[in-house]
Amino acid sequence: MNQTPYAVRHQDGATLLVAMIMLVLITIVGFSAMQTATVQERMTGNLRDKEVSFQAAEAALREQEAMLREALELPELAEGASQYGDGASTDLSAVSGDPESQVEKKYFIADSLDLGFKPQTGRDVYRIEAKGFGQSDQAESVLETLYAKRFN
């Protein structure tokens, strides 16, 4: 004469229902955490790609600056004319394409007061622009600088 109490008989399956709801909630939390991790991983990859493109552009910029710094005489550039570089001398194996650069003669800054008596001395100012690519074709960086050099 073992009878179950009245209150216990009417709760058949309530535990199963609560457990199922808890499992659904835990699954939703797990999926959202996984999605957040995936988005963060993609953002990190894009940031790395952008940094690689920036470094490639900076390497091309420094290469053109070194070319101007080591030049012993004025490069054959008329004012406003450009000279292009392909960045091939810089070894960048992690990028999708070689960086590109351009040197343009902008103007001359005279620093001598001897007008008309002898050739003017001063500095030539060049605009250097470089474009670097990342590991994918979507990431690219463009840098620009002004560089002054005295040739006389």
Image (cartoon, rainbow, N blue to C red):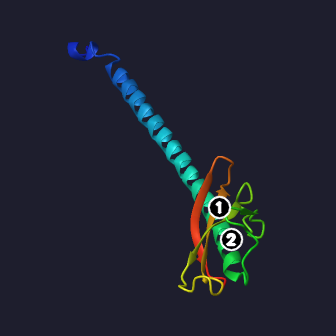
Label 1 and label 2: CA atoms lie apart by 9 Å
Number of dots carrying numbers: 2
Quadrant of the rendering where the C terminus is positioned: bottom right
Disc 1, SS:
strand
Q: Relative to residue 70, is residue 17 drawn left or right? A: left
Q: Residues within 10 Å of mark 1 (few under 14, many from 20)?
A: many
Residue 146: x %, y % from top left: 57, 68
For the point 53% across and 43% down, the residue is: 38
Residue 98 visible = yes
Residue 2 visible to the viewer: no
Above or below: residue 28 compared with residue 16: below
Q: Quadrant of residue 107?
A: bottom right
- What residue is disc 1 on? 130
Question: Any mark on residue 64, and which?
Answer: 2
Seen from the viewer's position, the closer of residues 45 and 104 is 104
Of 23 and 115, the residue lying toward us: 115
45 relative position to 100: left or right = left
At horizontal 70% and vertical 58% (from top left) the residue drawn is 95
Q: Are marks 1 and 2 in contact (CB under 8 Å)?
A: yes
Q: Residue at x 37, y 25 (%)?
A: 21
Vertical position of residue 138 compared to residue 10: above or below: below
Can you tell which mark lies on residue 60? none
- Could you tell me residue 55's position as x and y percent? 61, 64
Please, what is the three-letter code of the amino acid marked with disc 2? Gln
Which of 40/7 is in front? 40
Label 2 neighbourhood size at 10 Å, few (<14), some (14-19), many (20+)?
A: many
Residue at x 48%, y 35% (from the top left corner): 31
Residue 36 lies, with reference to residue 111, above or below; the image says above
User: Three-letter amino acid code at disc 1?
Assistant: Ala
Q: Where does residue 1 sit, x and y in percent of width and height? A: 25, 13
Q: N-terminal of the two: label 1 or label 2?
A: 2
